[in-house]
Amino acid sequence: MSAWARFFKNIQQDFKLFIFTLFVLCLYRVAFIGLLHQYLGDTTALSDILMSLFYGLRLSLKSAGIIALLTFLCCTITNLFIKSKEVEKVRYYLGSIYTILLTLLFHTRIPYYEEFHSAFDQIIFNTFKDDTIALFDTLVKQYQLPLRLFSVAVISFILCRLLKVFLATKTCPSPKFSSKPRRLVFRTTVILMIATFMVFTRFAGSFSYARAIHWENSALTKDAFLNEAILDDVQALYRAYAGYERLRNAEGLDIKADKVAEYGRQLANRSIMTNNIDDYFKKEAQGPKIQKPRHIFVIIGEAYAEWPLLPKYKDLNIANGLKNIAAKENAVTVKAFLPTGPNTAQAVNGIVTGLAEVNLYPNYHPETYKQPYATAIAAQMKKLGYKTYFWYGGFSSWQKIKELALSQGFDEFYGCNDLQDNSGNAWGMEDKFFLKEIAAKTTDDQPSFHVILTTSNHPPYTVNLVQEGFDEETVNSVPEYFKETKDWQQKLGHFWYADKILADFVSTMQKKYPDSLFAITGDHANRVNIEPNPSLYERYAVPFILYGKGVNKSIIPDNAAGTHLGIAPTLFELIAPKSFEYYSISDSLTKGNTIGTNHELWITANNIGKTGTPTIETLPNANSKKSSPTIEIIKQYSDSIQALSWWRIKNGRNI
């Protein structure tokens, strides 16, 4: 048998193993839903179950592709150089091992979901820190470990026998061609089909990342249980590993209790003796500066940077919506403003929990799910009589955002899978439809507080800009360097689109509810710049604009500076009654907070710098009349908020 004939036979065997593994994964998904059907929601319909099975099938293409790729490399490619019938045994052994592992994972998944209402997540890695004897005793007595292992053995034996029979079925011989050109065309076609198949499985039934499914965007139904069912055990285990790695790689500040107390007194700026770390965050409102608004909207624009708002980029015309809002008499802007961290998850963590970013990812940390942190914005807004909502244009499974929001005091959470729209891509629905849904669902029944996180200004850029009215001719003064960038029109056009839709939403809600208050910012800024070497400010700064009834240009001092951590205390000082007790790490911007820091940068009204380095740059809008704190004070403040946040997330409230 020629090398090509062996190759052609082997790829058919690999495909058989792929189909068999995909069948097993889907079988276990159906069994998971059937055995735990009591967890289905009351309003869940058959169509929802079928949807979860369909998307689960797509996602399992990736998991089945793992073993197919392994045998392709170990068996098919090897057999090109080594003529041996033992290759078939290797393929069978590898397939059997994978099948046994899938069976074991399935039997583990059932009690795991019953306990944690989740498929595998990073909590499973805490097992290695537990008392192993007590854990084993629990597994035997509570979870019938011997019976489960017996079931694993029996089912694995049956499946492995079926695999052996399936692999033993006949394969098609390679066609023989009399002419070399035809033979070359056929073989080239086969190779291209293999490559196409690999791409198709890699992107879970798609040919591009824009339409791909992965564990972070797999919550595609309205039923939380079915969303977990979409993840097969391999993908759920990968999710667990990813979450664990984010915790394990955190470089926290390993500090002692007495040092925490010292940092606490520095931050509180008063002498205080306490064993409760939250006491250092306690503040009292000075009294309302505006009439209490009926509705408050904190809008976090995906990748909405400050630099397009600068005068030097006025001809770009991609941020006119927010610029028009900022220019209104009842609006005020803080130019010296940074995000909590360099990505969306860190921004959300900071705004929701009120704690500084210290590489601990509180959205993956057990302490976050015990009860709301004292600094959590939603829990404190509820004390002021607001019903709290979190709206996310993406999928609720992303970064555990739904669990984070609900655990930290939000009454209701809505992701794109909860809303009736099919627009968008793998990251979520288009802003236009997302914000229309929010506008439609917002009522005047009671005061409400909303945090809104958009998604459209994020690659892959899939909004039909022409249909939305974007005219490339309106974008002027684009550097030639940037025009050489791939899809530069799409990048600027999607910023324009996000800005326009955001401004339209604010206008709509302001007209409908004139006594509303809007706080507008971006999650991060370090994605798109039109300059080859942007300044620190242009690369990292995000806007912060307050707009609403009673707001004026002088309500925040000129020398104010801050980060997302300053949003909550600023809102409290604007609307809360005198002596209202609230908790925050940062001071209110209305009280002249003059420092903003995250774990990478610091900013004041005049300067921006990289933490721990001598790098300092002057802000575009710097004014020598504005007083700025010294580097020593900035460092002390940065160390204090990071140390206290680290301790609170890692060790709880007790010092």
Image (spheres, rainbow, N blue to C red):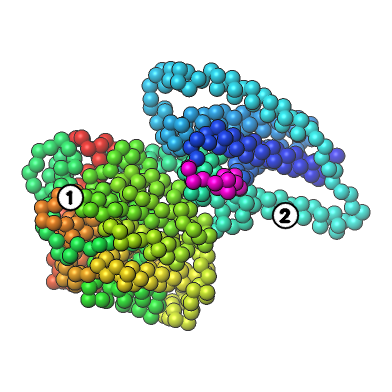
Q: Percent x, y for residue 637?
A: 18, 51
Which residue reaches farthest left?
271
Q: Percent x, y for residue 350?
A: 30, 51
| Labelled disc at residue 582 | 1
* Residue that mark 2 sits on: 192
Q: Percent x, y for residue 211?
A: 57, 57
Residue 44: in magenta span: yes
Q: Is residue 562 left or right of residue 58?
A: left
Residue 373, quarter of the rendered image: top left
- In primary-sequence order, the first of circles 1 and 2 is 2
Residue 377: in magenta span: no
Q: Is residue 570 left or right of residue 426?
A: left
Which quarter of the image is occupied by the N terminus? top right
Q: Amino acid at mark 2?
A: Leu
Secondary structure that dominates the magenta span: helix
Tell me if I can see residue 655 in this picture: yes
